[in-house]
Amino acid sequence: MIDDEPEPSIRGLVLALARTEDSAYVLSSDLRLLYTSKGWTTFAENNGGLGTLARWVAGSPIDDSWPPALSDFYRSAYASALATGERWEHEYDCSSPARYRKFRMFVYPIDPGRILVVNSLVVEMPHAQSDRSPDDLYVRGGFLTMCANCRRTLNPQTNGWDWVPAYVERLPRRTSHGLCPACVEVYYPLEP
């Protein structure tokens, strides 16, 4: 938890965040971090993100955590929840090199002018093992292309997007980011 002295209007919520296993946080209306859950810290600890936690102090803008290709999507969704007072939800992948994980994000407007974001685990299972040599398949012209959202890697031979745990575990220096077709459909759907 970032702040040990929450204001009275949200003290109960902050105390609940201290106990929840979900990765959750409270944001100000300008999308700055106010409070985090126990689950936020646990997730970071279990996924090699302890160094990242040091950057996330009270007042940090949450949009610094989004890949640039997704910034408009999340900024718009959070602003809509604040403006309408209605809950917004979204399902997304957040896998580790060894585990496939899907989360559901719930964005709840709370008074006065704050939002609560809760990320709940929906699915977790081991990735299928592959004995392929990643560099032989995915690196072309010295670069590989990875989806900025789901972190799948473009296979230039098939034009398919594959899960390559070695690249999630250690991102090569010469990596180009974009969005795979599945993520483009979610984040930038064509207007009907």
Image: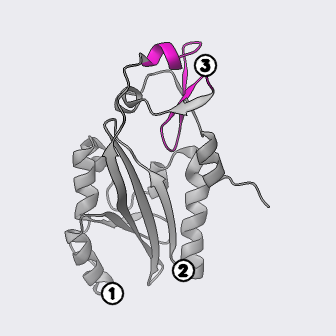
Residue positioned 34% across, 29% down in the render = 129
Span colored in magenta: 134-158
Percent coordinates x, y for residue 64 in the rendering:
47, 50
In the image, 37 versus 52, the foreground residue is: 37
Is 82 situated left or right of 133 in this image? right
Q: How many marks?
A: 3
135 inside magenta stretch? yes
Q: Secondary structure at mark 2?
A: loop
Q: Determine whether 166 is above or below 117 in the image.
A: above
Residue flagged by tag 1: what amino acid is it?
A: Ser
Residue positioned 65% across, 50% down in the render = 185
Residue positioned 49% across, 54% down in the render = 63
Mark 2 crowd level (few <14, some 14–19, many ≥20, 10 Å Cα): few
Is 40 situated left or right of 69 in this image? left
Q: CA distance from mark 1 to mark 3?
A: 57 Å
Is 181 situated left or right of 13 in this image? right
On the question of residue 133 being in view, the answer is: yes
Q: Nearer the viewer, mark 1 or mark 3?
A: 3
Q: Nearer the viewer, mark 2 or mark 3?
A: 3
Q: CA distance from mark 2 to mark 3?
A: 45 Å
- In the picture of the structure, the residue carrying the numbered disc 1 is 9
On the question of residue 1 being in view, the answer is: no
Residue flagged by tag 2: what amino acid is it?
A: Glu
- In the picture of the structure, the residue carrying the numbered disc 3 is 157
Q: Earlier in the sequence, mark 2 or mark 1?
A: 1
Q: Which colouring convention does the figure follow? A: one colour
- In the picture of the structure, the residue carrying the numbered disc 2 is 86
